[in-house]
Amino acid sequence: MLIRPDAEDLRVISYYLGRVLLVTAAFVTLPLTWALIGREWAPAASFVLTAGAFALVGVLAAARRPAEPRLDWSHGMVVVALTWLVVPALGSLPLALSGHFADPLDAYFDAMSGLTSTGATLIGDLDHLAPSVNFWRHLLHFMGGQGIVLAAVSIFAGGVGLSLFYGEGREERFLPSVRATGRFIWWAAVVHLLFGVALLGSVAYFSLGFTPARSLFHGLLIFFSSFDTGGFTPQSTSVGYYHSALFEAATMVFMLAGAMSFGLHYALWRGRRRLQSLRDLETRSLAVTLAFTMGLLMVGLVSLGLYRSTGSLARQGLFHAVSAHTSSGFTTVPSTEMREWGGLAFAGVALAMFIGGMASSTAGGLKAIRVGLVARVLKDQVKRVLLPERAVISHVYQQGGRQRLTPQTAQAALLVALLFVALCLLGTVVALGYGYPLQEALFESVSASANGGLSVGIYSPDMPVLLQVTYILQMWLGRLEF
C-alpha cells in the first residue's frame, strides 16, 4: 500500500480518519460547555464552528465504507500521520478567531504544539485570553498526551485498533488486547486527573490564596500540562507565575508520572513486577540520564554564579532538569534569563530534552529505552575489542523480563537515534540560515524535535515563516517518532 496506494487503500484511510475526527468532535463539546457556562459568547460560537467542522469533515471522510474495512500496519501509519495534521488544522479555529494570534499559521503552530505536547507558543497577551479558549489549549495536551487516536482505539476492535495503536508510536501492549490497553491508559489518566486537580488546586487555594474557582482552573490546566508533559500554562510567565516551591514540587510529581510508561504504571498499580520494573533497562536509563543532565545543569549554574544561595540553585536546577527531561517545557525564569545560562547549563537542558521520557508515555524525545539500548550496543562493542576472541559476551538485558539484544533491535534503536539527530540538525541549519547563533538555533531545534517546548526566544510571532514551518514539521515528526 505504501508504494502504490489504490482506490480501496484511500477509501480505508479516509474512512478511519473520518471516524477519528468524529471522536475529536466530541472533545470540542467540553470547551463549548465551558464557554456557555461562562457566558463567553464569541468563544462559544468558535467552538460550535470547530465542532461542526470536525463533524462535517469526519462524516464526509467516513461516508463510503470500504469493502474490506480492516487496517493493515501501513494504513494505520497513514491514518495516524494525517490525524496529527488535520486535528491541529481544525483545532486551531478557536485560537485563530480569539484575536490573540497574528495570523492563522501562528494559531496552527500553537495547535500543533498543543496536540504534540510540545508547549511552545506564539500567542499574544496570554494573560487576557478567554478561559474557555485557554482550557481548549490545555485540553489539546490531554488529547495528544493520551493519544486522540488511542481514544478511537478504545472504541475500535481487533486489527483496526492494533494498526492504529502501533501507528501512533505506542510500543508496549501490557494487556491481552489493544482495546483493553487503550482503556487502561485513559482510566489511568482520569484517576491521575482527579488526584492531580485535587492536589494542585489545594496548593493553589491554601498556599497561594487563590479563590476556589481560580484554584480549580489553575489546578486543572497545570495538571493537563504536567501529566501530559506539555508545557502550556494559563499565564505568560509559566510556572514562575506562582512563586511557590510547593507548587513546583507538586508539578514535578506529575511531570515524572507523565514521563513513566503506562506499562510501568500498570505494573506499579497492580502490584506486579514492582521491583523487577525498577531494574528494567529503561527505568535505570531514565534515572541515570536524569542525574547526569541535572549534574551538568547544576555545575553550569554554579560556574555562572547566577544564583547565590544553595537553595535557589538547587530549586532552579532540579525543576528545570525534570521539566526538560520529561519534555514538559515548564520554566520559572524568562527565556532571556535562560539564554544567559550558556555552556554546561545549556547543554544539560538540551541533552535532557533530547533524551526525553519513557516509551509509551506522554513524554517526547528519543526515549530512555533507545538511549539504554544504544549505550548497551556501544558497551558490547568495547568489550568485543578489549576481551579475548574466545570470550563470551552476554547480549541479555532486563526489560519486562529477560530480553535478548538482537541485531535487529540494535539496528532499529541506532536508526531512530540517527534520524532524530538528523531532524534536530534540520531545524538548526534553517535557523542558522536566518542568522541565529548556533547555540540558540540548536537548543530551539532540539526543543521542537523532542516536543520539549523550552525556548530561549527564537519562538516568536516575528520568526521567519520557513523556520516556523520547519518547527511545525519537527513537532509533527517528533511526536510520530518516524
Image (tube, helix red, strand yellow):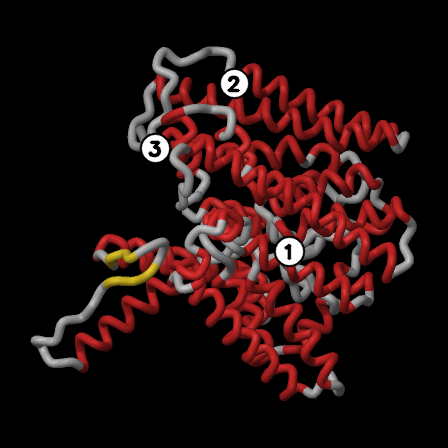
Residue type, label 3: Trp
Q: Identify the residue shown where x is 64% and y is 68%.
A: 320
Element under label 1? helix
> Residue 218: x, y in percent?
80, 50
Which of the pair 120/251 is nearer the observer?
251
Q: CA distance from mark 1 to mark 3?
A: 33 Å
Residue type, label 2: Ala
Q: Nearer the viewer, mark 1 or mark 3?
A: 1
The earlier-in-sequence mark between 3 and 2 is 2
> Residue 134: x, y in percent?
77, 43
Crowd around label 1: few <14 · some 14–19 · many ≥20 (10 Å): many
> Residue 223: x, y in percent?
70, 50
Which of the pair 448/441 is nearer the observer?
448
Q: Identify the residue shown where x is 75% and y is 61%.
A: 239
Residue type, label 1: Phe
Q: Which mark is residue 61?
A: 2
Q: Which mark is residue 192?
A: none
> In the picture provided, is 312 more to the left or to the right than 77?
right
Q: Which residue position holds label 1?
A: 254
> In the picture provided, is 84 more to the left or to the right than 210?
left
Q: CA distance from mark 2 to mark 1?
A: 37 Å
Question: Is residue 187 shown to the viewer in this render?
Answer: yes
Which of the pair 210/373 is nearer the observer?
210
Q: Quadrant of residue 136?
A: top right
Question: Is residue 426 shown to the viewer in this render?
Answer: no
Crowd around label 3: few <14 · some 14–19 · many ≥20 (10 Å): some
Q: Which residue position holds label 3?
A: 73
Q: Residue furthest left?
A: 390
Q: Quadrant of residue 9?
A: top left
